[in-house]
Image: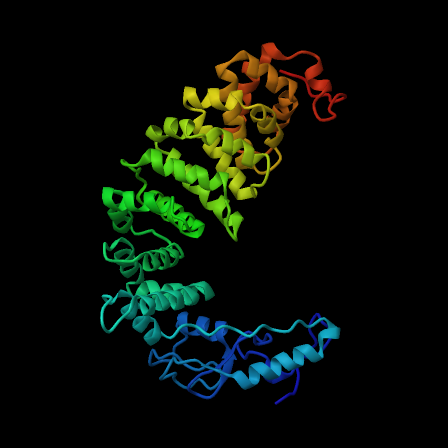
Amino acid sequence: MPTSLEPLDTGIQIPYHFRCPISLELMRDPVTVCTGQTYDRTSIESWVSTGNNNNNNTTTCPVTRAPLSDFTLIPNHTLRRLIQEWCVANRSNGVERIPTPKQPADPTSVRSLLSQASAASGTHVSVRSRAAALRRLRGFARDSEKNRVLIAGNNGKEILIRILFSDESPHELVSESLALLVMFPMKELDQCVSIVSDPNRVGFLTRLLFDSSVETRVNSAALIEMVLTGSKGTVTTNSESILEGVIDLLRNPLTSHPRRALKIGVKALFALCLAKNTRCIAVSAGAPEILIDRLAADFERCDTERALATVELLCREAEGCAAFGEHALTVPLLVKLILRVSDRATEYAAGALLAICTAEERWRDEAVAAGVVVKLLLMVQSECTERAKRKGQKLLKLLRDSWPDYSFANSDGFGCSEVVPF
């Protein structure tokens, strides 16, 4: 058997036994199967999942072709340490040390922890031990998607929902179960409806939006957004309080992870504003001001898109148009964001401007003075969405009477542009 293979891009030879027999790449998480052969974990898991069988319809070992009677994967710690030592020794040649992989959760351990977490607190099981079980499960869930699938496959979400909304759950269990529950997608319609249609559960989540723990407030907003999106419904109770809590989260994301708080806050606000009956409530709660202030400061790209979509939704209400129009930054900021972030952001910004400029002439003049004409002319000739182009064309037509000569000379250095209004 050769001791090495052909050189890679690093210009060095990787020892043969450090290579996965399936992918022929350096192993990052070597595991041994029942035949005694060692493979990289991701490669052998993919081999098994794709059904590489023999004539007897039995999954075989890639090297020996012997049937795999047991799918247990045993970590080869000795080989992994040798690979890490080799990486360190060849660091000068551009080889990076592979990190020590986190081992997947054991199914038996997961079932035991779920059983412990869901047990009634009493003589044999304390609140502290139940909370510890939830924290260990959260650690597993944080490690990998595979662990999250394993937990969910053992009725994890159903158990967590029961703990969260149980009248007997103390605050520690509520916060721990909520923090773990929001790590899973809520795509099951019946689960989402069972929460969003229950006034008691909605009221409970609303109270958590004002909890003394900011992390619990963030997680409550996350769950509200998830069940609204999953059920494609709306909350029929506590709308004012929910919006107040979500907007306060955007206003004061005072957590160890403020980016997450802002992301969840704008996602929750968007989900709430999809329902027409909540938009005026959102306007009264101060959503226009906080959205514009955040857009002007510190949103990331996907959050900017969602925030602009929310602005456009709120501008469909007369009260929303008025509130946004009166904010000094709204019009120049929306003009600035056209063709700057993404096609989606351009579409939403143009739609919001169309609504605002339709409402009052003074805001049309403000948009023209901010350089919107050239932005729109470029937009309708760009490769942005057809919806964005239609909105841009409508806005150009609306602004036609407000086009003084200086609107081109003052637009981002396009004074000599040959682009003229149609």
Residue at x 33%, y 28% (from the top left corner): 277
Q: Indicate the quadrant containing the N terminus: top left, top right, bottom left or bottom right.
A: bottom right
Residue 146 visible in the snapshot: no
Q: Residue furthest right?
A: 416
In the displayed structure image, the side of residue 394 where residue 184 appears, left or right: left
Against 394, is 100 above or below?
A: below
Residue at x 35%, y 36% (from the top left corner): 241
Write down the quadrant of residue 58 in the picture: bottom left
Write down the quadrant of residue 146 in the picture: bottom left
In the displayed structure image, the side of residue 397 where residue 245 appears, left or right: left
Q: Where is residue 408 in the image (x, y as percent from the top left)?
A: 70, 18
In the displayed structure image, the side of residue 191 where residue 37 appears, left or right: right
Q: Indicate the quadrant containing the C terminus: top left, top right, bottom left or bottom right.
A: top right
Q: Position of residue 287 (x, y in %)?
A: 45, 31
Q: Nearer the viewer, residue 44 or 267?
A: 267
Against 120, is 277 above or below?
A: above
